[in-house]
Image (tube, rainbow, N blue to C red):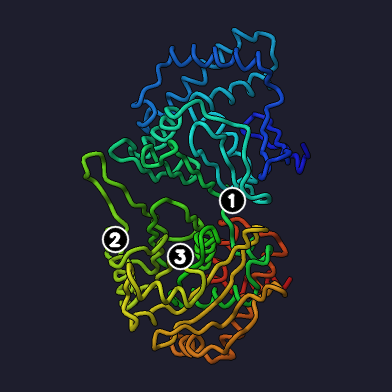
């Protein structure tokens, strides 16, 4: 066995060690997780404590799902665990007691060792394929890895799925064997039950970034250049609609959220998502909305279309949509663009040509004459071998509905290079603003200086970035003078 990498992290008060190994005759690396402070005997005693406390507290469905009782039940559970630990381990230190308490809280009130995996910042996905196989994880550096963690049986996988679903008011059963939900942390969860998944029950957890990416982070990691970020900022300031496209896990939603940092603080923003992922600065006038699946009786569903139609009655200046999937959603959004709303959405497509093809063909079927409502198309790319994400193309949609790629990623130089001159974007900006091309270029240069200053001074939180942008809109001279100093 060869050790590829080893590192430590903390899950609450629990110190975790991870070793990534290459075993002989194995075609994938092994992700081994260990809690160094817990021996086998100690773990047996802790399991006994957990059983004792669970019997005493008698956690029920109502206690877990009722928001008013959740905190009360959690505190009651914790107090009982602390008392029982002191009974079994009277001489341990406060630090060890806290460590044991966190471990048992995760095991009894959460998802057990899955919670430990979700605490590793290096992981993007945590999956259970069935109870026989070990859990798999997607590591930012090493890709898919097998772990040394197993779940007890298929019923335990189903229990985890039911627990997650109930907390957000959704159910999973033989009649409704598919579940899309999210954890309290925002991590997205998909679950399937046998016999739909023929090898067993599954859970797929996509981790939600603890700190959402900002445009500062993307500039630092070379996801895009300062000049291209300035162009996007200029387009957003002057209310041009945009689509963010790309393949799976290319960072479409993260980029959409980062673009939201450029919105004006006096504009009303409505976001519509299946699962809450986008996070915008506190300085914005923002109303986030999420869809809802029907209950077991088939009632109470709130679809993406319902929310988009409703958002048009809320006097929005900007509408953000997590993903366009269906014809009626797309038609409503394009109508919104035609009536003067600025719309920003994501779509699965690998380049600008494919974006057009997807929009004008089933199942979306948008008439081609409506496409010029979109001013910009931003295509994301991810190198699956290295995990690096980049903006692949920045394009405009011409008046006949055909695409014109303005900037494209040169893979050898790892840089966005000019491919063609713009034919619509700049004339549209000059028409709508009354500014000359030189004045718009000066505004973009000004924005570039602000972005460089934020990168240099590591202003990379959502609210920190939003504060600078809000100051730019409300007191530009003061901000530019401060930056010059």
> Between disc 1 and disc 3, whose residue precedes?
1
Count of numbered tags: 3
Dot 3 alpha-carbon crowd within 10 angstroms: few under 14, some 14 to 19, many 20 or more: many
Local SS, label 3: strand
Residue ID for mark 2: 305
Q: CA distance from mark 2 to mark 3?
A: 18 Å
The mark found on residue 348 in the picture is 3
* 244 over 240 or under it: above or below: above
Of circles 2 and 1, the one toward us is 2
Dot 1 alpha-carbon crowd within 10 angstroms: few under 14, some 14 to 19, many 20 or more: few
Residue ID for mark 1: 211
Going 24% across and 46% down the picture, which residue do you hit?
300
Residue 95 visible in the displayed image:
yes
Q: Which quarter of the picture shows residue 46?
A: top right
Q: CA distance from mark 2 to mark 1?
A: 29 Å
Badge 1 vs badge 3, beta-carbon distance below 8 Å: no
Q: Foreground: 43 or 215?
A: 43
> Between disc 2 and disc 3, whose residue precedes?
2
């Amino acid at each position: 066995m060869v050790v590829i990498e080893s590192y430590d992290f903390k899950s609450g008060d629990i110190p975790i060690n991870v070793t990534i190994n290459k075993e002989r005759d194995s075609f994938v690396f092994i992700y081994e997780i260990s809690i160094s402070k817990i021996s086998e005997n100690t773990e047996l005693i802790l399991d006994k404590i957990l059983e004792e406390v669970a019997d005493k507290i008698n956690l029920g469905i109502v206690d877990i799902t009722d928001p008013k009782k959740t905190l009360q039940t959690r505190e009651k559970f914790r107090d009982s665990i602390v008392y029982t630990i002191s009974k079994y381990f009277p001489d341990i230190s406060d630090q060890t007691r806290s460590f044991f308490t966190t471990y048992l809280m995760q095991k009894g009130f959460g998802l057990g060792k899955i919670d430990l995996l979700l605490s590793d910042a290096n992981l993007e996905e945590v999956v259970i394929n069935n109870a026989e196989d070990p859990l798999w994880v997607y590591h930012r550096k090493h890709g898919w890895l097998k772990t040394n963690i197993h779940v007890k049986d298929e019923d335990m996988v189903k229990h985890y799925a039911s627990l997650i679903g109930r907390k957000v008011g959704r159910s999973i059963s033989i009649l409704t064997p598919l579940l899309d939900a999210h954890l309290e942390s925002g991590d997205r969860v998909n679950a399937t039950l046998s016999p739909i998944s023929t090898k067993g029950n599954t859970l797929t957890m996509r981790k939600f970034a603890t700190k959402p990416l900002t445009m500062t982070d993307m500039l630092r990691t070379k996801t895009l250049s300062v000049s291209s970020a300035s162009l996007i900022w200029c387009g957003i300031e002057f209310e041009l609609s945009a689509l963010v496209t790309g393949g799976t896990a290319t960072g479409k939603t993260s980029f959409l959220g980062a673009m939201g940092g450029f919105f004006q603080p006096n504009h009303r923003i409505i976001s519509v998502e299946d699962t809450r992922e986008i996070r915008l600065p506190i300085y914005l006038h923002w109303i986030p909305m999420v869809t809802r699946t029907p209950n077991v009786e088939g009632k109470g569903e709130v679809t993406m279309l319902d929310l988009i139609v409703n958002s048009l009655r809320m006097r929005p200046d900007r509408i953000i949509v997590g993903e366009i999937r269906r014809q009626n959603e797309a038609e409503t959004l394009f109508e919104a663009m035609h009536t003067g709303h600025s719309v920003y959405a994501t779509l699965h497509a690998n380049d600008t040509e494919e974006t057009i093809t997807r929009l004008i063909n089933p199942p979306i079927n948008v008439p081609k004459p409506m496409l010029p409502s979109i001013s910009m198309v931003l295509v994301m790319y991810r190198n699956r071998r290295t995990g690096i994400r980049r903006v692949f193309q920045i394009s405009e949609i011409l008046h006949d509905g055909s695409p014109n790629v303005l900037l494209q990623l040169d893979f050898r130089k790892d840089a966005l290079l000019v491919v063609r001159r713009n034919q619509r974007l700049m004339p549209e900006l000059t028409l709508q603003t009354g500014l000359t091309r030189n004045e718009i270029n000066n505004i973009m240069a000004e924005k570039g200086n602000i972005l460089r200053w934020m990168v240099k001074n590591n202003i990379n939180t959502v609210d920190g970035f939003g504060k600078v942008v809000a100051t730019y809109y409300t007191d530009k001279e003061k901000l530019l003078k401060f930056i010059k100093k």
